[in-house]
Image (tube, rainbow, N blue to C red):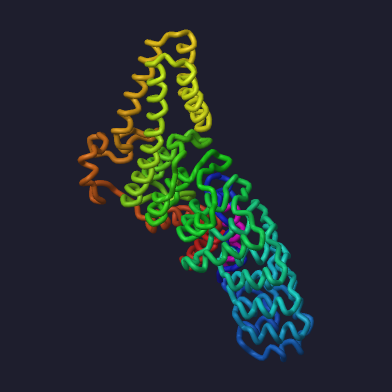
Amino acid sequence: MIDVSRSPPPYHYDTMNSTINGLILFKESLDLCRDISEVAMTKVHEAILQCADLQEALKEQPWAINTINDAGESPLYLAIRRNQFRSMEVLISAGADVNQQSYDGWTPLMVAVNLENVESVKLLLKSKSKVDLCNDDGVTALHWASSKANPQVISLLLAAGASVKHRDAFGDTLLHWLTQSENNSHQGIEAAIEMLLMAGSDLEALDNQGNTPFLQSITSNKLEVTRGLVNAGCSVDISNSRSRNLLHLAAKNASLGLLEFLSVLNLSGFGPYQEGSDGDTPFDDLVRTSQATTGLELIAVRRPVLAEQDAFVELYQGVRDQALQNDIQNPERVLGALQEQDIAVAREHLVLLVEKEKLWERGSLVSWYRAVDKRMQHAEWELATEDVEDHLLELQKELETPVWEIPSKYGYLWEFEDGESVSEEAYENLDDSDQQVVGEDDAQAAWEIELVTSLGVKANIQTKDQVSRCQMLWIQA
């Protein structure tokens, strides 16, 4: 049995805390890996499980109407989970508590919403279910509705007065939760986003990691959600609290479709060499992720196949080339002013360069531009001109060099057996046979097996069925 109460909150892949918390949740979930026959049941629970006479069971054990079994389920909770609408009606008519919370804070309404059972949601709301109760993680029914991107359920909860301002324990808003949706319907996603925004949700809200819903949608690799948020007018030129922008997150998480969508966005003004708090640029992240060899290295990321590496290279090179072209324009203006010995105009353009490099946190270039400014202030025109000319040559050479020919912190993206990087000509002919690539499913399976095996030994998991169920619990946790 997979406990629906273990469904995941929005992922926080850019912090190892998510991995640690996940491991803790996995261990806590091991005690749930038991056969249903091992769980003690009242006759009321059994009647629901066996589709027997529920009213007769209530007559025999009226005290059991709100009893929680060893799995943390009340009879009403169980009836909802098994989609027994008539049993729900009988229980509610007999006085079942529609707001009773399970051991981890789940309400019947949360279960119905999580299962997207519209009729059950309507019945519970009609029966005075409280829409803003939270579970132990600070999650409300509307969070779960958002995670399903189900416009009908969202509409029902909003009409019942559900708050759009509530955040969960991780600081996630409803739009952050929407980034976990498996709903691939463009219309459904757009409708859900529009409803939440009309009700007062903040498109640019930051979670505890400094991620907006847009950044979280890239981390979660949700193309339609990303598209919907962009269409709603979200900012794309932003970074989270670890100084990671969309390029960092796409390098580690985006599949081909999402990369192709990002490539058509206007990313002018992006700093391609922006370093995250770990000192890695987006291209460093791509190379490191592409070179990952073990399952545990891929817990927080997905190893890209060659087509995805190629797509990211195209995206990244487009951003880099645009940035370099802008970098070249301003020094050219400085050079023109130097040749005319117009210090005011030259310094005006230098100020723009300094401010841009400050924003991109490239301290060495800030210092270099300031040194050129000092030369101009001392009327060292020839030396200042030589400096700027040399710098322009370096920028032009960089612009002419494909990004895959430039080594990252972790080496080259593509290498032949002799250790040489892939040339531009070889790149054109590169295919999947030239390197070993672990597919998404293979990488996912590798880390799951490695993780479950290592923890399973400690937890004395012995059967294949138990391992399989614990894998599922881990994925949800």
Q: Is residue 24 magenta?
A: yes
Q: Position of residue 38 (x, y in %)?
A: 61, 73
How many numbered tags mark residues here? Answer: 0
Left or right: 472 in relation to 96: left
Comparing 214 with 404, the one in front is 214
Q: Position of residue 275 (x, y in %)?
A: 48, 35
Q: Position of residue 438 (x, y in %)?
A: 34, 52
Residue at horizontal 44 percent and vertical 41 percent from the top? 268
Comparing 103 with 204, the one in front is 204
Q: Is residue 387 above or below residue 141?
A: above
Q: Is residue 112 magenta?
A: no
Judge whether residue 299 can be spotted in this image: yes
Q: Is residue 120 above or below residue 400?
A: below
Q: Examine the residues drawn in magenta and state their main secondary structure.
A: helix
Comparing 56 with 428, the one in front is 428
Residue at horizontal 47 percent and vertical 24 percent from the top? 349
Left or right: 59 in relation to 328: right
**Which image quadrant: the C terminus?**
bottom right
Left or right: 311 in relation to 120: left
**Which image quadrant: the N terminus?**
bottom right
Q: Is residue 233 above or below residue 125?
A: above
Read off the magenta span.
Answer: 22-34
Toward which corner of the image does residue 77 lie, by quadrant? Answer: bottom right
Q: Is residue 31 above or below residue 203?
A: below
Judge whether residue 72 can be spotted in this image: no
